[in-house]
Image (tube, grey):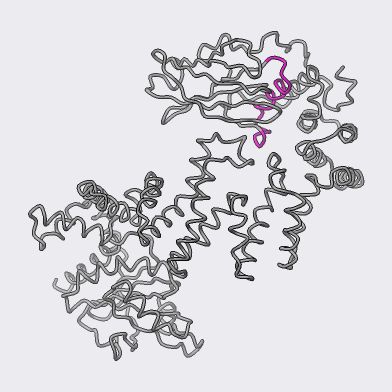
């Protein structure tokens, strides 16, 4: 019967199929005490009981276990999370309802820190005679097909290509209709296991398949099978098959792939927009939710983003974004969160009302996507696994939304998003730490807020607002305001602080530095030459520089600390500005934030005409590039320390500045 199908792969290689014919649905599973299925011979649609005995597994003596339930039905994988009930020591049980078309099932079991994949025998069960059962069993254990099959197995259970091919043969022998669903895998395996040229067999098989009515997945399998041929020597055949596919399925997978690539490669933005409108009508996304192609994976999301940002940039139109938000690819929704919410929030380039409006639409949609595994990942992740993955991609944007909600008074929503991101950011991210401490205090959990801040201090990840809460508590409990700084210092990790101090001191230099004479926001001008005998801290920044602004709370903490010290001067050098009214904008920004900063305005560069004369002079002399740029000049007028960028916390930055200042003071006295 097999040979009459003209299927190029189904000659039974040198293995005797009869030796592998199973009279039972399980694969030696009756001897596998760790895993049993009741009833022993289930059918699709049955409710079954899974019993897991962990006595001799990596999950022995656990208090809590969960499982993941993989079902191969209708030639595709369905993945579900399952809970387990402990019925005795190291014995667990769960009940599941089989899919009506279930052909093969597989389980993995998980504790908090470990996973049991089943070893050599696996925790799998064949549903007797169900279409797809044998091919699923043969392909699941072959790592060559890990794009289509969830490789949630120990590598010891993997099988060779020739064994997988045998199972394909068994499948077609028992379920001839399966041929139209496994022909690509069979042809691939035949090529890998046979030295003889398989071109004629591939062509013969494709001629047979093309005579059948094909669904979208089968159409794509034809395309993939064409990829097995030498593309140069078989061009006319490949072209003829593609012509047949396009004629029979003008709204099918190949037609869609070609249109995606064509639109992506189109250079005219308006032509791309018009073409994409027609594309959406001809190839509705929901119709193709069950098939993923290489072309689609490579180009569709990029095409979608190109169209969306063309509307935004060229037409100043956000209608496409919001009208199609619920159907936009997940990666695009993440991208919207970054480009339309986080970046303008960080750069302060959008009004708070607009930020709140955009975030209020995009972020909840991002969160909704956690509940729906995208089709390209349905054979890879359970709902719980996907939610964890999605959250890892989204938590930074959730934090941004929490910042916005803090500013607009949306405290209830803010608390929700802070709890979501807490496992990723607590103690290690100062922005989160500040919002969380403020939330605890606002909710009346004052001691919890203090305890949280104390833990953050161990990592030196605190802000001025957090220290204000701690100071209030310190004084309330009888501490003196004059003792607060030493109290805070004592709370920090001594080892970490000492190590950080040693690293900073090792970075010190002693280089002469050219002077400047720059206009000051306080009136008049400031000359570096006039600062001899003082320690001078210069912070180069710009109104357009997000990291510069992010560093300013820490710089304010340092400025406040030395506010009464006439021998320590801080200057904030505004450089590389390009807008006409930058001085007015700078003044407005400093006033809005309440920063006690003296701003110096960089002079015009005689060579370029840009407002970066001092920056360019120092960048060339000391071989650096970029802002924020912090420089500390000692009492003799020499450059002693320099730092580019900002990645830390306000308290850590203030400590860095203070460490250098105190070292230079002590150096002068010695």
Residue 10 appears at what percent x and percent y? Answer: 83, 23
Left or right: 117 in relation to 225: left
Q: In this view, does 467 lie above or below 62?
A: below
138 drawn magenta: yes
Q: Is residue 371 above or below residue 18?
A: below
Left or right: 247 in relation to 535: right
Query: Residue at the spot x=89%, y=31% of the render?
Result: 208
Q: Which of 538 and 593 is in front in this view?
A: 593
Query: Residue at the spot x=14%, y=58% of the render?
Result: 486
Left or right: 456 in relation to 407: left
Quadrant in which residue 612 is drawn: bottom left
Residue 525 appears at what percent x and percent y? Answer: 30, 90
Confirm whether residue 527 shows in the render.
Answer: yes
Confirm whether residue 233 shows in the render.
Answer: no
Residue 431 appears at what percent x and percent y? Answer: 35, 57
Q: What stretch is highlighted in magenta?
A: 128-148
Q: Nearer the viewer, residue 538 or 664?
A: 538
């Amino acid at each position: 019967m097999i040979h009459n199908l003209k299927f190029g792969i189904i000659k039974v290689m040198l293995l005797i199929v009869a030796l592998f014919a199973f009279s039972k649905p399980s694969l030696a599973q009756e001897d596998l005490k760790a895993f049993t299925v009741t009833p022993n011979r289930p059918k699709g649609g049955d409710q079954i009981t899974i019993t897991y005995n962990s006595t001799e597994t990596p999950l022995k003596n656990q208090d809590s276990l969960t499982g993941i339930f993989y079902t191969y039905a209708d030639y595709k994988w369905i993945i579900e999370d399952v809970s387990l009930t402990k019925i005795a020591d190291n014995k667990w049980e769960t009940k599941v309802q089989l899919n009506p078309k279930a052909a093969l099932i597989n389980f993995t079991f998980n504790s908090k820190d470990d996973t049991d994949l089943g070893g050599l025998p696996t925790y799998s069960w064949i549903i007797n005679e169900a279409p797809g059962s044998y091919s699923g069993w043969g392909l699941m254990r072959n790592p060559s097909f890990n794009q289509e099959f969830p490789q949630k197995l120990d590598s010891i259970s993997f099988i060779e290509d020739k064994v997988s091919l045998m199972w394909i043969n068994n499948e077609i022998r028992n379920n001839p209709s399966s041929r139209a669903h496994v022909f690509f895998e069979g042809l691939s395996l035949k090529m890998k296991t046979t030295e003889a040229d398989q071109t004629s067999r591939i062509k013969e098989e494709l001629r047979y398949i093309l005579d059948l009515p094909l669904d979208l997945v089968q159409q794509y399998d034809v395309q993939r099978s064409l990829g097995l041929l030498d593309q140069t020597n078989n061009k006319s055949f490949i072209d003829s098959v593609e012509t047949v596919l396009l004629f029979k399925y003008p709204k099918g997978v190949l037609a869609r792939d070609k249109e995606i690539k064509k639109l992506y490669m189109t250079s005219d933005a308006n032509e791309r927009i018009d073409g994409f409108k027609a594309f959406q009508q001809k190839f509705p996304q929901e119709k193709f939710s069950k098939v993923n192609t290489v072309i689609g994976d490579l180009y569709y999301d990029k095409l979608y983003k190109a169209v969306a940002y063309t509307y935004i940039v060229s037409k100043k139109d956000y209608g496409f974004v919001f009208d199609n938000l619920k159907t936009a690819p997940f990666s695009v929704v993440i991208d919207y969160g970054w480009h339309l919410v986080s970046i303008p929030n960080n750069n302060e380039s959008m009004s708070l009302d607009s930020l709140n409006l955009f975030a209020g639409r995009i972020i909840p949609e991002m969160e909704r996507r956690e509940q729906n595994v995208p089709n390209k990942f349905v054979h890879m992740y359970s709902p719980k696994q996907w939610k964890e993955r999605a959250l890892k991609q989204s938590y930074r944007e959730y934090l941004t939304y929490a910042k916005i909600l803090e500013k607009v008074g949306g405290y209830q929503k803010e608390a929700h998003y802070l709890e979501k991101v807490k496992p990723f950011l607590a103690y290690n991210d100062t922005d989160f730490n500040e919002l969380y401490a403020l939330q605890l205090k606002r909710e009346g959990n004052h001691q919890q807020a203090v305890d949280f801040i104390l833990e953050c201090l161990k990592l030196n990840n605190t802000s001025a607002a957090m220290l204000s809460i701690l100071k209030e508590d310190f004084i309330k409990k009888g501490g003196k305001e004059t003792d607060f700084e030493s109290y805070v210092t004592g709370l920090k990790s001594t080892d970490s602080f000492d190590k950080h101090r040693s690293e900073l001191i090792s970075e010190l230099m002693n280089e002469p530095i050219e002077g400047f004479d720059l206009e000051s926001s306080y009136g008049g001008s400031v000359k570096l030459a006039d600062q001899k005998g003082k320690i001078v801290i210069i912070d180069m920044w710009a109104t357009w520089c997000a990291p510069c602004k992010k560093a300013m709370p820490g710089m304010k903490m340092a400025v406040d600390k030395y506010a009464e010290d006439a021998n320590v001067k801080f200057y904030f050098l505004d450089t590389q500005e390009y807008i006409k009214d930058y001085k007015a904008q700078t003044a407005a920004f400093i006033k809005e934030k309440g920063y006690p900063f003296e701003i110096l305005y960089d002079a015009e560069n005689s060579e370029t005409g840009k407002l970066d004369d001092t920056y360019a002079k120092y960048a060339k002399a000391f071989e650096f590039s970029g802002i924020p740029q912090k420089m500390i000049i000692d009492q003799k007028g020499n450059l002693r320390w320099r730092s580019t960028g900002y990645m830390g916390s306000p308290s850590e930055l203030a400590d860095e500045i203070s460490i250098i200042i105190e070292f230079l003071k002590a150096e002068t006295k010695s």
